[in-house]
């Protein structure tokens, strides 16, 4: 009989902290995805500053979001804990949970940075169009 390596599906943790962090992550993600549509120049300027700050934070923080670091710190008492923490696993968890697939981390990085760039360009275009109107 052969053993089959079956990985357990990833999903948000169901305790209060997990649900709260997941909801906050989703709120930030929703703002990032639709923020370029905002009609306020001040809010668009914030959006245009937020996106590169997020991307820089990911790059400097080893691919981990500060929201995940805070959750890990609250759970384990450590800022980074690859074994028991949530460090850099949010997108991987979403892909596994929603699409039952686990893309390699390099693919998730390319996707993340590409989407951020496209959204930033859309936001900049909208900002310029509002500023010229």
Image: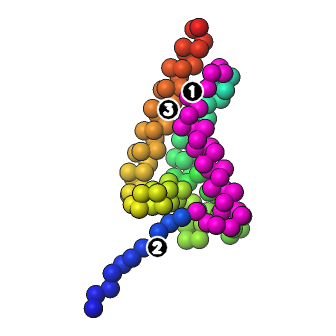
User: Where, by quadrant of the figure, is residue 77 drawn?
Assistant: bottom right
Q: Is residue 92 visible?
A: no
Above or below, comparing residue 66 to residue 114 in the picture: below
For label 2, the residue is 8
Total label count?
3
Residue 84: x percent and y percent?
A: 59, 71
Residue 60: x percent and y percent?
A: 55, 48
For label 3, the residue is 119
**33 drawn magenta:** yes
Q: Which mark is residue 108?
A: none
Q: Which residue sits furthest top?
A: 133
Which dot, 3 or 1, sits closer to the camera? 1
* Foreground residue among 41 and 59: 41
Above or below, comparing residue 61 to residue 33 in the picture: below
Q: Pointers 1 and 2 in contact (CB under 8 A)?
A: no
User: Where, by quadrant of the figure, is residue 14 drawn?
Assistant: bottom right
Q: Residues within 10 Å of mark 3 (few under 14, many from 20)?
A: many
Residue 59: x percent and y percent?
A: 52, 46
Secondary structure beneath label 3: helix
Q: Which residue sits furthest front?
A: 98
Q: Which residue sits furthest left?
A: 1
Q: Is residue 98 visible?
A: yes
Relative to 4, is 90 on the left or the right?
Answer: right
Query: Which region of the structure is painted magenta?
Result: 12-41
Q: CA distance from mark 2 to mark 3?
A: 33 Å
For label 1, the residue is 37
Secondary structure beneath label 1: helix
Q: Residues within 10 Å of mark 1 (few under 14, many from 20)?
A: some
| Quadrant in which the N terminus appears | bottom left
Name the chief secondary structure element in magenta. Answer: helix
Secondary structure beneath label 2: loop
């Amino acid at each position: 009989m052969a053993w089959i390596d079956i990985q357990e599906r990833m999903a948000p943790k169901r305790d209060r902290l997990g649900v709260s962090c997941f909801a906050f992550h989703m709120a930030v993600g929703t703002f990032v995805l639709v923020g370029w549509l905002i009609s306020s120049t001040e809010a668009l300027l914030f959006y245009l500053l937020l996106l590169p700050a997020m991307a820089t934070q990911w790059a400097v923080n080893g691919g981990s979001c500060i929201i995940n670091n805070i959750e890990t710190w609250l759970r384990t008492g450590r800022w980074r804990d690859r074994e028991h923490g949530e460090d850099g696993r949010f997108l991987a968890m979403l892909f596994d949970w929603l699409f039952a697939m686990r893309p390699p981390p390099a693919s998730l990085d390319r996707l993340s940075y590409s989407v951020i760039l496209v959204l930033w360009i859309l936001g900049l275009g909208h900002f310029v169009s509002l500023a010229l109107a």
